[in-house]
Amino acid sequence: MDAAGTRPNIVLILADDLGYGDLGGPWGGKANTPHLDQLAREGLRFTDFHSNGAMCTPTRASLLTGRYPQRMGFERAYATKGREERGIASPGIHEITIASYLRQAGYATGIFGKWHLGKHASANPVRFGFDEFRGLTDGDGDYFSKLDRFGGDDWLYNEDLVHQGGYATTVTTDNAIRFIERHRDRPFFLYVPYQAVHFPWQEVEDDRFEIRRLGEDFTSGKPGPRSKLGPHRPGEIPDVMQRMIQELDRGVGRLMATLRQHGLDRTTLVFFTSDNGAYVHYLDPDFVDPAAAKLPAPDWPRVGSNGPLRGQKTQLYEGGHRVPAIAWWPGKIAPGATTSQTTMTMDILPTVMELLAIKPPAETGPNALDGISLLPLLLRGETLASRTLFWRAPTQTAVREGSWKLVNQALYNLAEDIGESRDLAAQRPEVVRRLKSALTDWETKFTKR
Ligand SMILES: [Ca+2]
């Protein structure tokens, strides 16, 4: 924070594929997560927070721009061999990121971890407002060798390939801590998109299974027990996942300890969330409904947990996009509170802009924000204005209005059926009509042609 005390540091910690039921403590999961439990105890815990997408790329785009990913045409995750994928630097896309806004406002800006918004040099984070980047540009990579799923080297320091040894989660924490220490005397924006707990499912002591050979494809295009995706020991996925979550939790604990050590804990807003729900079981990333798709039994029947929610990563049921979220700022955000207000990834940027009194782009302009500021909720516990929210994936749509949720053609009342098990479309045709009409209007206005 600066001398006037008006510009807090902003730390965004993003977990990858961490589900609604994966964390311990108040989330009810099996993993031992004392540091995230403490963050929730000292901050505000969201029980109805949603990622904008059910896969990595769309949610990351919304987090950084405050806008629906459909504005950019992002509805699924990139996974492309080589470095030709332009992603957020594609022709016709002119996005301004939260890092650009904050750098303009005098903040030091750093990203440590997974980018996943394009692997081409023109899409590098340093071209999108970040002063410093260390991490991977693809959606996943070996946690030790840092090779991407196609066997290409993918660990960068700014625009160059610069390998760092060690386990990716731990290395990312180390990098983020060094950034805090270097910038502790000026306002900083730190974005920590951990790769954890995305596959390959490797834990800290799993280095004997690392993929060492450049060009070696760790999925081989054939996910299965014998692929290099993991797990490497039969029946170990649940344990591996718990250990991956626990290293993520330990990383959060180390970041928080660093803030405290430098007296920054009352001058820093920390926001923690996940980019989409967990894989409960894993087979093919494109599957929507195992029964309809007639795919074989899942390769790994038990991966992560979305608690009581239906569905998983890639799907627009709640399990695909209702995710853990915590906002933390001692002295400003009341400790130990829980909110059930419906909120979304794209709300984070508008929140930060209001906090720092940065003028938002014109509502009718090319970078108009779609999210809303959560500041009245964070600082004063106020009720946010009601709104209708939308998700879209290549073969799925979802609309949320109050407790109603329309998923494709099915209607659920989440207030009494959080597991989306009772389709009320036949009983409430007027609600279906209203939500479909809202979806059509949104698609007309918000989606890139
Ligand atoms: Ca993800």
Image: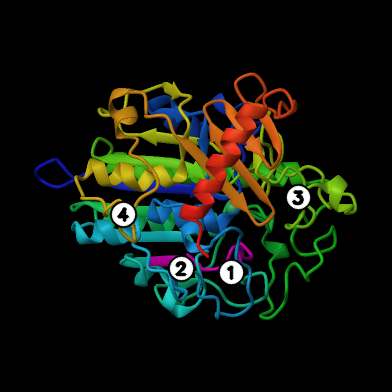
Disc 2 is placed on an element classified as: helix
Q: Which colour scheme is used?
A: rainbow
What span is colored magenta in the figure? 133-146
Answer few, some or many: residues within 10 Å of disc 1's Cα (few below 14, many 20 plus, some between 14 and 19): many
Give the amino acid type for the residue marked by disc 3 in the picture. Answer: Val
Q: Which residue is drawn at 38% across and 44% down?
A: 348
Question: For the residues marked 3 and 2, what is the alpha-carbon distance in whole angstroms?
Answer: 26 Å
Q: In this view, does 254 lie above or below 105?
A: above
Task: Give the residue at mark 4.
Answer: 364
Q: Residue at x 36, y 70 (%)?
A: 126
Give the amino acid type for the residue marked by disc 1 in the picture. Answer: Lys
Which mark is first along the chain, 2 or 1? 2
Q: Is residue 291 magenta?
A: no
Task: Give the residue at mark 1.
Answer: 146
Which mark is first along the chain, 1 or 4? 1
Which mark is first along the chain, 2 or 3? 2
Which quarter of the rendered picture does the N terminus lie within? top left
Give the amino acid type for the residue marked by disc 4 in the picture. Answer: Thr
**Residue 233 bears which disc, if any?**
none
Task: Give the residue at mark 2.
Answer: 88
Give the amino acid type for the residue marked by disc 2 in the picture. Answer: Ile
Answer few, some or many: residues within 10 Å of disc 2's Cα (few below 14, many 20 plus, some between 14 and 19): many
User: Residue 97, image x and y in percent?
Assistant: 35, 60
Q: Is residue 141 magenta?
A: yes
Q: Which residue lies furthest to the top in this view?
A: 416
Disc 4 is placed on an element classified as: loop
Question: For the residues marked 4 and 1, what is the alpha-carbon distance in whole angstroms?
Answer: 42 Å
Answer few, some or many: residues within 10 Å of disc 4's Cα (few below 14, many 20 plus, some between 14 and 19): few
Which mark is first along the chain, 1 or 3? 1
Question: For the residues marked 3 and 1, what is the alpha-carbon distance in whole angstroms?
Answer: 30 Å
Q: Is residue 91 above or below residue 340?
A: below
Question: For the residues marked 3 and 4, what is the alpha-carbon distance in whole angstroms?
Answer: 35 Å
